[in-house]
Amino acid sequence: MPQPIVQLGEPALRASSKTLSIDEIKSAKIQSLISIMKEAMRNAPGVGLAAPQIGVNLQLAVIEDCIEYTSNMPPDILKERERTPVNFHVIINPILTITDPAENLFFEGCLSIAGICRITPRAKSVYVECLDENAEKKIIEATGWYARILQHEIDHLNGKLYIDHANEKTEIIFDETNRKKWSQASRKEIIEYYFEKIK
Protein backbone atom coordinates (compact mmCIF):
# COMPACT_ATOMS: atom_id res chain seq x y z
CA MET A 1 0.00 0.00 0.00
CA PRO A 2 1.58 3.34 -1.09
CA GLN A 3 2.33 5.93 1.57
CA PRO A 4 -0.58 8.44 1.67
CA ILE A 5 0.20 12.04 0.72
CA VAL A 6 -1.15 14.49 3.29
CA GLN A 7 -3.47 17.29 2.19
CA LEU A 8 -3.85 21.01 2.87
CA GLY A 9 -4.71 21.51 6.53
CA GLU A 10 -2.13 18.99 7.75
CA PRO A 11 0.18 20.91 10.18
CA ALA A 12 3.33 19.31 8.71
CA LEU A 13 2.80 21.26 5.47
CA ARG A 14 3.20 24.58 7.31
CA ALA A 15 6.13 23.69 9.56
CA SER A 16 9.82 24.29 8.91
CA SER A 17 11.78 21.09 8.42
CA LYS A 18 14.81 19.81 10.33
CA THR A 19 18.18 19.43 8.60
CA LEU A 20 19.78 16.00 8.47
CA SER A 21 23.28 15.05 9.59
CA ILE A 22 25.52 12.88 7.45
CA ASP A 23 25.03 9.95 9.83
CA GLU A 24 21.27 10.38 9.68
CA ILE A 25 21.28 10.45 5.87
CA LYS A 26 23.21 7.18 5.76
CA SER A 27 20.97 5.49 8.32
CA ALA A 28 18.60 2.70 7.37
CA LYS A 29 15.70 4.84 8.56
CA ILE A 30 16.36 7.67 6.08
CA GLN A 31 17.27 5.31 3.26
CA SER A 32 13.93 3.58 3.81
CA LEU A 33 12.15 6.94 3.87
CA ILE A 34 13.69 7.83 0.49
CA SER A 35 12.39 4.59 -1.00
CA ILE A 36 8.93 5.23 0.43
CA MET A 37 8.88 8.76 -1.00
CA LYS A 38 10.07 7.57 -4.41
CA GLU A 39 7.24 5.05 -4.57
CA ALA A 40 4.64 7.58 -3.39
CA MET A 41 5.78 10.16 -5.98
CA ARG A 42 5.65 7.66 -8.84
CA ASN A 43 2.27 6.27 -7.78
CA ALA A 44 0.69 9.72 -7.58
CA PRO A 45 2.18 10.41 -10.19
CA GLY A 46 4.16 13.60 -9.68
CA VAL A 47 7.48 15.22 -10.57
CA GLY A 48 8.52 15.81 -6.97
CA LEU A 49 7.65 15.02 -3.38
CA ALA A 50 8.92 16.60 -0.19
CA ALA A 51 9.06 14.80 3.15
CA PRO A 52 6.45 17.11 4.77
CA GLN A 53 3.98 15.81 2.17
CA ILE A 54 4.00 12.47 3.93
CA GLY A 55 3.93 14.15 7.33
CA VAL A 56 7.68 14.09 8.02
CA ASN A 57 9.37 17.45 8.70
CA LEU A 58 12.84 16.74 7.36
CA GLN A 59 14.86 18.68 4.75
CA LEU A 60 14.46 15.98 2.14
CA ALA A 61 12.77 15.82 -1.26
CA VAL A 62 12.76 13.50 -4.26
CA ILE A 63 12.47 14.69 -7.86
CA GLU A 64 11.91 12.99 -11.21
CA ASP A 65 10.39 14.34 -14.43
CA CYS A 66 9.94 11.30 -16.68
CA ILE A 67 9.82 11.55 -20.46
CA GLU A 68 6.50 9.68 -20.33
CA TYR A 69 4.89 12.69 -18.65
CA THR A 70 5.45 14.87 -21.72
CA SER A 71 5.27 12.32 -24.54
CA ASN A 72 2.07 13.86 -25.93
CA MET A 73 3.25 17.47 -25.77
CA PRO A 74 4.36 19.32 -28.93
CA PRO A 75 8.15 19.80 -29.14
CA ASP A 76 7.77 23.57 -29.56
CA ILE A 77 5.83 23.83 -26.29
CA LEU A 78 8.43 21.74 -24.45
CA LYS A 79 11.17 23.96 -25.84
CA GLU A 80 9.32 27.12 -24.88
CA ARG A 81 8.92 25.86 -21.30
CA GLU A 82 12.50 24.59 -21.20
CA ARG A 83 11.22 21.22 -20.08
CA THR A 84 13.43 18.18 -20.53
CA PRO A 85 13.46 14.85 -18.65
CA VAL A 86 15.04 14.89 -15.19
CA ASN A 87 16.36 11.63 -13.75
CA PHE A 88 15.38 10.54 -10.27
CA HIS A 89 17.43 12.22 -7.58
CA VAL A 90 17.32 13.24 -3.94
CA ILE A 91 17.96 16.68 -2.46
CA ILE A 92 18.76 17.03 1.24
CA ASN A 93 19.34 20.24 3.23
CA PRO A 94 19.05 22.33 0.03
CA ILE A 95 20.07 25.97 -0.16
CA LEU A 96 18.49 27.72 -3.13
CA THR A 97 19.78 30.88 -4.79
CA ILE A 98 17.90 32.60 -7.61
CA THR A 99 20.29 33.27 -10.50
CA ASP A 100 17.79 34.71 -12.98
CA PRO A 101 14.75 36.36 -11.40
CA ALA A 102 12.96 36.78 -14.74
CA GLU A 103 9.41 35.68 -13.99
CA ASN A 104 7.98 32.58 -15.63
CA LEU A 105 4.21 32.15 -15.46
CA PHE A 106 2.47 28.80 -15.66
CA PHE A 107 -0.17 26.72 -13.92
CA GLU A 108 1.18 24.87 -10.93
CA GLY A 109 -0.44 22.18 -8.86
CA CYS A 110 0.50 20.12 -5.83
CA LEU A 111 -0.05 16.54 -4.73
CA SER A 112 -1.05 17.96 -1.34
CA ILE A 113 -3.72 20.29 -2.80
CA ALA A 114 -5.66 17.90 -4.96
CA GLY A 115 -7.84 18.96 -7.86
CA ILE A 116 -6.86 22.59 -8.46
CA CYS A 117 -4.13 24.60 -10.16
CA ARG A 118 -3.24 28.27 -10.21
CA ILE A 119 -0.87 30.31 -12.34
CA THR A 120 2.25 30.65 -10.24
CA PRO A 121 5.21 32.94 -10.98
CA ARG A 122 8.62 31.33 -10.58
CA ALA A 123 12.16 32.53 -11.20
CA LYS A 124 13.64 31.41 -14.50
CA SER A 125 16.92 29.99 -13.13
CA VAL A 126 18.22 28.77 -9.78
CA TYR A 127 21.36 27.40 -8.14
CA VAL A 128 20.97 24.76 -5.45
CA GLU A 129 23.56 23.42 -3.02
CA CYS A 130 22.51 20.20 -1.32
CA LEU A 131 23.45 16.69 -0.27
CA ASP A 132 22.33 13.57 -2.10
CA GLU A 133 21.17 10.23 -0.66
CA ASN A 134 24.79 9.26 -0.06
CA ALA A 135 25.44 12.48 1.88
CA GLU A 136 27.64 13.75 -0.94
CA LYS A 137 27.63 17.44 -1.81
CA LYS A 138 25.84 18.35 -5.03
CA ILE A 139 25.44 21.54 -7.04
CA ILE A 140 22.40 21.92 -9.28
CA GLU A 141 22.06 24.68 -11.84
CA ALA A 142 18.57 24.63 -13.31
CA THR A 143 16.46 26.72 -15.60
CA GLY A 144 12.91 26.62 -16.90
CA TRP A 145 10.71 23.74 -15.77
CA TYR A 146 13.35 22.05 -13.62
CA ALA A 147 13.92 25.35 -11.80
CA ARG A 148 10.17 25.50 -11.14
CA ILE A 149 10.17 22.00 -9.64
CA LEU A 150 13.10 22.83 -7.36
CA GLN A 151 11.48 26.03 -6.14
CA HIS A 152 8.21 24.19 -5.46
CA GLU A 153 9.82 21.34 -3.51
CA ILE A 154 12.21 23.52 -1.50
CA ASP A 155 9.26 25.74 -0.56
CA HIS A 156 7.69 22.66 1.03
CA LEU A 157 10.74 22.25 3.26
CA ASN A 158 10.17 25.76 4.57
CA GLY A 159 6.47 25.39 5.24
CA LYS A 160 5.38 27.17 2.07
CA LEU A 161 2.97 26.09 -0.66
CA TYR A 162 2.52 27.22 -4.26
CA ILE A 163 -0.75 28.94 -3.31
CA ASP A 164 1.34 31.41 -1.28
CA HIS A 165 2.82 32.71 -4.55
CA ALA A 166 -0.08 32.14 -6.95
CA ASN A 167 -2.93 34.48 -7.78
CA GLU A 168 -6.19 32.92 -6.56
CA LYS A 169 -8.09 34.56 -9.44
CA THR A 170 -6.33 32.22 -11.85
CA GLU A 171 -7.51 29.03 -10.14
CA ILE A 172 -8.91 26.24 -12.29
CA ILE A 173 -10.32 22.83 -11.51
CA PHE A 174 -7.72 20.42 -12.82
CA ASP A 175 -10.06 18.04 -14.60
CA GLU A 176 -9.44 16.22 -17.87
CA THR A 177 -10.79 19.12 -19.96
CA ASN A 178 -8.47 21.69 -18.39
CA ARG A 179 -5.56 19.26 -18.41
CA LYS A 180 -5.86 18.90 -22.19
CA LYS A 181 -6.41 22.62 -22.73
CA TRP A 182 -3.58 24.03 -20.63
CA SER A 183 -0.93 21.32 -20.79
CA GLN A 184 -0.26 22.29 -24.40
CA ALA A 185 -0.93 26.02 -24.11
CA SER A 186 1.69 28.46 -25.36
CA ARG A 187 3.37 31.04 -23.14
CA LYS A 188 1.39 33.73 -24.96
CA GLU A 189 -1.91 32.01 -24.12
CA ILE A 190 -0.93 31.62 -20.46
CA ILE A 191 0.08 35.26 -20.14
CA GLU A 192 -3.11 36.45 -21.82
CA TYR A 193 -5.22 34.32 -19.50
CA TYR A 194 -3.28 35.55 -16.46
CA PHE A 195 -3.71 39.25 -17.14
CA GLU A 196 -7.33 38.81 -18.14
CA LYS A 197 -8.06 37.19 -14.78
CA ILE A 198 -6.16 39.61 -12.54
CA LYS A 199 -7.24 42.88 -14.10
Image: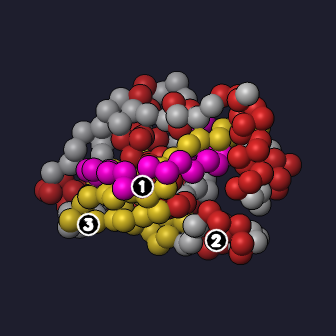
Q: Main secondary structure of the magenta part?
A: strand
Q: Secondary structure at mark 2?
A: helix
Q: Disc 2 to disc 3, how far (Cα)?
A: 26 Å
The residue positioned 34% from the left and 65% from the top of the image is 140
The residue positioned 55% from the left and 29% from the top of the image is 8
Q: Which residue is mark 1?
A: 100
Q: Quadrant of residue 157?
A: top left
- Disc 2 crowd rating (10 Å Cα; few below 14, some 14-19, many 20+) is few
Labelled pair 1, 2 in contact (Cβ < 8 Å):
no
The residue closer to the viewer here, 137 or 11, is 137
Based on the picture, tell me whether residue 106 belongs to the magenta stretch: yes
Based on the picture, tell me whether residue 52 belongs to the magenta stretch: no
* Residue 186 seen from this side: yes
- Disc 1 crowd rating (10 Å Cα; few below 14, some 14-19, many 20+) is few
The numbered dot on residue 79 is: 2
Q: Disc 1 to disc 3, how far (Cα)?
A: 20 Å
In this rendering, would 177 be left or right of 66?
right
The three-letter code of the residue at mark 1 reads Asp
Q: Which residue is mark 3?
A: 138
Which mark is first along the chain, 3 or 1? 1
In this rendering, would 106 be left or right of 147?
right
